[in-house]
Amino acid sequence: MKKFTKAIAVFCAMAMVVSVFSATVLADDEQNTEEQSQEIVGVEPAANEEPTPEQESEQESEQEPEQDSDTAPFVNGVITQADIDANGFKMPETAGDYTLAEDITVSGSAQISAAGSQVTIDLAGHTITYTGTANLYTVGLIEPATVNGHTSVLVHGNIVLTIKDSGTDGKIIASNTTTGGVDHWISIDGNYPKYGTEEGHRGGCILVQNSCTLKLEGGTISGFHSQSDGGAIHVSNGGHCEMSGGRITDCHSDSLKPNDDGAGAISCHCTSQGTEAKNALLKTSENEEAVVTTISLKGSLKITGGQIDHCSGRQGGAIRILRADFEITGGTITENSGLIGGGILFAQGQKKTGTIKISGNPVITGNHATGDDAKKANLWLLDGATVILSDNLDSTAQIEFGTSNASGNIFDINGKTYSIDSFICDHADYITYVSGSNIKIKKYTLPKVTGYVIGIGGEIFFKVYVDFGTASQSAVSTNYTYSYTKAGSAEVVINKDATEFNSDSKGTYFVIPVESACMTAPITITLSCEGHEKVYTTSVEDVANDSVEIDSSYADLVNALLTYGGYAQVQLKINTGKLPSVDGVNFAEAPDFGLTSGTYAPASDPDRAFGGANVSFLSKTEVKLRFSKSALGDTAPAMTVNYAEGSKTVEAVEAGNYYIYTLKGYDGAGFKASQYDVTFEYSVGNVSGEYSINTYLKVIFGTGIQSMKNLAQAYYGFAKKSATFA
């Protein structure tokens, strides 16, 4: 600045003109031209006199020496170790596009200070090993200045540093524990700003100052530390950072200032005194003069891609945003840890400034809170912050979050496309739900399936036990689905809503009847509540085997059940692509359970009215008795059936030349497998007799085709085993 001032003074003296350097002021329309004319930093009106020889000598001595282009470092934008050594062991500081030609070691801290500079570093698959203890780069320069006789600041802005990698494994790694750079943060002192310094505490790898930008497009930054904010990157008030690719990993902020220590990867914040400062001097390029202006003190961070992982910090394991603007549309933030905000801490502070916008497909999950409060694990929202869903959210997005203000608006969805399953609350016993145009959280326990019991008596069925949590049963939609395919037929889909619930000593349950030939069919159970769906998938085979894991005494019964189911699949040609797995059973061979053939002769059948029987081996074990219409008359009489438990009346269904009576056992649920050998008596019209499941099995075993014999034998074995558990 001193050099700049003297150059102006000499120029004015040589011109023999007394003048005052003026700069444009961002002022109200009412101010006149004279009020907009301000003095540049430290520039006094030049005297109408020639410079002294001493002044000319001092001016010449301060001129930068010219470098021989053949010996200057970074010729043609190539970075080699020799270039780094020749540049004071530092990275390039002047505008240009630079590409690493080899792996290099850097020990000095570089600063890009020329306003308007555009510096691009292409790692090109190579590694920068940083051995210094400050930081690799400081982007931007802030100096003291004078405006209208008041202490102010001069900001060299519009500087952009871009880090990219045209190779596949470019890295910037720290071999020593870095401490960060000197942050010249701007504060407000009345009508004129000033700056303070944070000596060597912030931005372990890169520090971005006011009106400057860092673009991280590729490469990996790892191993950096800061003593305060931003283990890898610190964005000082008024600075900007854009991350579209690359990775930040294993970076940390330490505990020099335990009450204000934050962001293992990226810290971005604004002064607590306000969001803008007037009467500051700003240069946006080196070929233009500084102008008196109002500068923004509110920084910003935008993430559209890349990954941040395995970083740690007291406030924000990965990212800390304080009174700044944050936008995330992509990227993955996972496996970071922090005492407050394991992944991201976003705070508006007392000024309630700063915005957070989310869209696209960001993933913020799997981060950890190192303190006692697990609700601060991933995205931790302070000060009642409202997140704006600024555009549609992809189905792959996953945002886990917690907030200090559980009753406040958390996400303003504002008509955008989203899935409520993309939002998961870190609060224990809290859920996300939709209220108007907002996604909020509230203390809630979603319903869940707590277990299954398989019934293998009259029916093969599940009792599915449901804990409704804090929801009312009527607020929960319960659905189950499974399907089966019979050879040569279209797929059959069973899709039903469960509406009837019962209770026993184990809890509240609903029942899913299952076809015997569907031992291996996936059964999907869906519980829906408050926009959330929880899906459970199981099968008869899985639940049966789980029963054996719980109580090994069920092993023989479960094996018999699955054997019966497998032979039902073969006989009925249903779901034959996947048969149950039962030790020692080959479903291509006939089982041997001791069933023998027999004949049946009705006790009283003068007109040969009884036409035979068949048994259903699907879900319920049912018996159908068939009688000739010619023997019973034009109107089917009711049948009386006497069971061991009592008697009941059964009506017929007309089918061709027969009346069909379907018997389901005394309880109406079907005959229990364990009662296969228990006879029942029937009488219809002038015909009476007795029958049993075992009677049918023997007839089929003696006269049926081989596959039907196999099924009868398998059922016989299952029934015998069931009888021992009855």
Image (cartoon, rainbow, N blue to C red):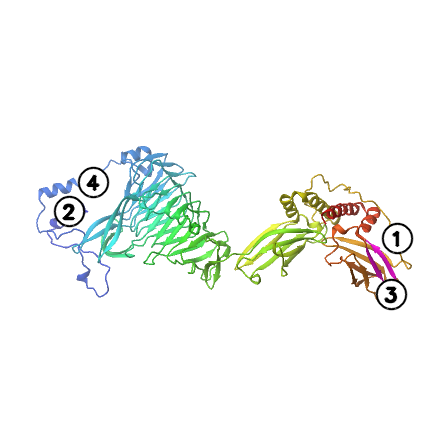
Secondary structure, mark 4, is loop
Q: Which of marks 2 and 3 is in front?
A: 3
**Residue 280 seen from this side:** yes
- The 10 Å Cα crowd at callout 4, few under 14, some 14 to 19, many 20 or more, is few
Ranked by sequence position, the earlier of labels 1 and 2 is 2
Task: Please state which amino acid type lies under the numbered disc 1.
Answer: Ala
Q: Residue 633 carries which label?
A: 3
Q: Nearer the viewer, residue 559 or 130?
A: 559
Q: How far, Cα to Cα, is label 1 from label 2?
A: 128 Å
Task: Say which of marks 4 and 3 sits in front.
Answer: 3
Which is more toward the observer, 327 or 622? 622
Question: Which of marks 4 and 2 precedes in the sequence?
Answer: 2
Where does the image place residue 215, in percent across and percent down from the top left? 36, 47
- In the structure shown, which secondary structural element does the residue marked by tag 3 occupy? loop
Type of amino acid at the residue the image marks with label 3: Gly
First of labels 1, 3 by sequence position: 1
The magenta segment: 680-691
Mark seen at residue 601: 1
Q: Which amino acid does label 2 sit on?
A: Lys
The stretch drawn in magenta includes residue 705: no
Residue 400 is left or right of residue 203, and the answer is right
1 or 4: tag closer to the N-terminus: 4
Q: Main secondary structure of the magenta part?
A: strand
Disc 1: CA contacts within 10 A as few (<14), some (14-19) or many (>=20): few
- In the image, taking residue 643 as reference, residue 478 lies left or right, namely left
Front one among 122 and 245: 245
Residue 64 got which mark? 4
Residue topped by disc 2: 6
Q: Which of marks 1 and 3 is in front?
A: 1
Q: Quadrant of residue 406?
A: bottom left
